[in-house]
Amino acid sequence: MSTKYIFFTGGVVSSVGKGVTAAAAGLLLKERGFKVAVQKLDPYINVDPGTMSPYQHGEVFVLDDGAETDLDLGHYERFIDIRLSRVSNFTTGQVYAEVIAKERRGDYLGGTIQVIPHITNEIKRRIGLVAKETGAEIVLVEIGGTVGDIESQPFMEALRQMRNEVGRENVYFVHVTWLPYIGATGELKTKPTQHSVAALRSIGISPNMIIARSDHPVNDDLGDKIALFCDVEKRAVIPMVTTPTLYEVPLLLEQAGVGDFLIEKLGLKATRKPDWKPWQRLVDKVKSPKPAVKIALVGKYVELQDAYMSVREALRHAALSIGVEADIQWIHSADLEKGKSWDALKAADGVIVPGGFGSRGIEGKILAAKYAREEKVPYLGLCLGMQLMCIDFARNVLGYEDANSTEFDRSTEHPVIDLMIEQRAITDMGGTMRLGLYPCVLQKGSVAAKAYAEKQVDERHRHRFEFNNAYREEFERNGMVFSGISPDGKLVEISEVADHPFMVGTQFHPEFLSRPHRPHPLFVGLMKAAAKRAGVK
């Protein structure tokens, strides 16, 4: 059977929900027995988001093979419950780097290198890799940005060419647009959607389905109007009103008949009936009243919550699993340094300090770790959050007042966190960290081992610095438990404070492997301890 491709484009505005829509559609198809894979095409010229500011791009989602990818891949993995690889995300930067490298080697035999065919051919090659490497029957491809962007034009042209090369019967275009609401007249407007479809058609692509996003109900008359002016079937205009929980989107698409419609148009037959009971239970849990447990998320990029998307979702998964609501208090670490936001921190039932880079706001995170340790507040430190927990311990338990990480102070007398040996000769910033899935051996009887109920686990990493083993024995003598170690014994993976309800730090990023129906054990451990402190469990 030929591979089927569903391409998702966006219109009117960016951040309209293409990623969630593609993820939900993938789940609809998986529930019908198909093997699916998902890919995100990012038109920016950066090679990957690894060197981009979280303010610019949100979180960097790391895969098993170490690829630093777009946050939409987190949606794909969480919704469809699949493990993706680096072929599932590529950028304009990667495409041009590959084509230029081939030209330098002489692969093009002196030919003039042009956007068509050389750039578009490389885009098509990379799209084709997904089916080859995964064996997927259906590949869902999301194109970043908005129709009309200069950056995305080569991608759109490549999709147009693919439709002819793989056969029109094997390609389906879904256009996700936004219906703006005019408050003065109380109307939703379809004109921007019409313009975005006209822009698509001007480059040779006619959408087969339109997902009409809105914050307000979309009536049948509006759907009929979109169908008429955009030349799509009436039943292929799908209203998608903003929902309080992302996890309801698959159910809404199913109710709208999207799953059956897609396989009908692709000439496929389902091998099983979808079972939506688990998802319905999940959504019912989300919507039902629950006792709130306050979790202070102390970060550097809290103005843009997408910078911590996987952490936020992992907290929600864990909270749902024990029947509580994770009421996240977003606290800027720099505020703590200025004496602000302490009331919010002290009102929290648990504290989480996520990853990050650079010296800004670091002392505020250390203060949060110190507060959690001294006041016995449940604490989970992720990557940098673990390192700063160790710096607090060195300063305030061992008495090394200038203890620090060489990331922030190269001349510190007590570098309890230092650059990994294999990182010391590296000068490039992109894609050079310890990235991807690595094993961790758990110490029997530790908090972490009890949470996992396993002897060894595999977790995703993204870091350059590590705990300095020269201090390991001294830390252990004074109440720090190194409960997770790399199999060769060289790298501290998990640290925890003894005689504390729950104070755990991980060198890895457990949030990347949390799933709605399978919350991560360490997040569950944090939520249980926080709920107990709150007196609700």
Image (tube, rainbow, N blue to C red):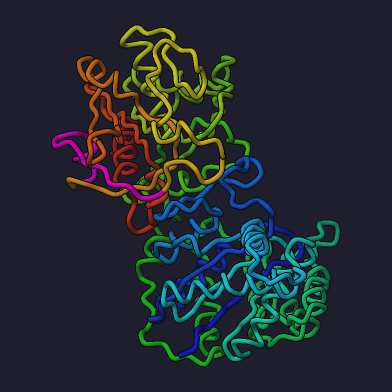
Left or right: 518 in relation to 124: left
Which stretch is magenta? Answer: 436-452
Left or right: 520 in relation to 153: left
**Where on the picture, by quarter, is residue 446?**
top left
Q: Say which of 318 and 416 sits in front.
A: 416
The residue at the point 39 percent across, 57 percent down is 516
Instruction: From the top left corner, tell me how far across and down residue 418 is, in percent.
Output: 41, 25
Q: Is residue 385 above or below residue 499?
A: below
Q: Is residue 326 visible?
A: no
Which quarter of the image is occupied by the C terminus?
Answer: top left
**Where on the picture, by quarter, is residue 288?**
bottom left
Q: Is residue 149 above or below residue 218?
A: above
Instruction: From the top left corner, tell me how far across and down residue 475 is, in percent.
Output: 26, 18
The residue at the point 71 percent across, 79 percent down is 223
Instruction: From the top left corner, tell me how far across and down residue 503 is, in percent.
Output: 31, 28
Q: Is residue 301 above or below residue 78?
A: above
Q: Say which of 112 and 182 sits in front.
A: 112
Let me know if residue 442 is in the magenta part: yes
Left or right: 12 in relation to 280: right
Residue extending furthest toward the right: 184
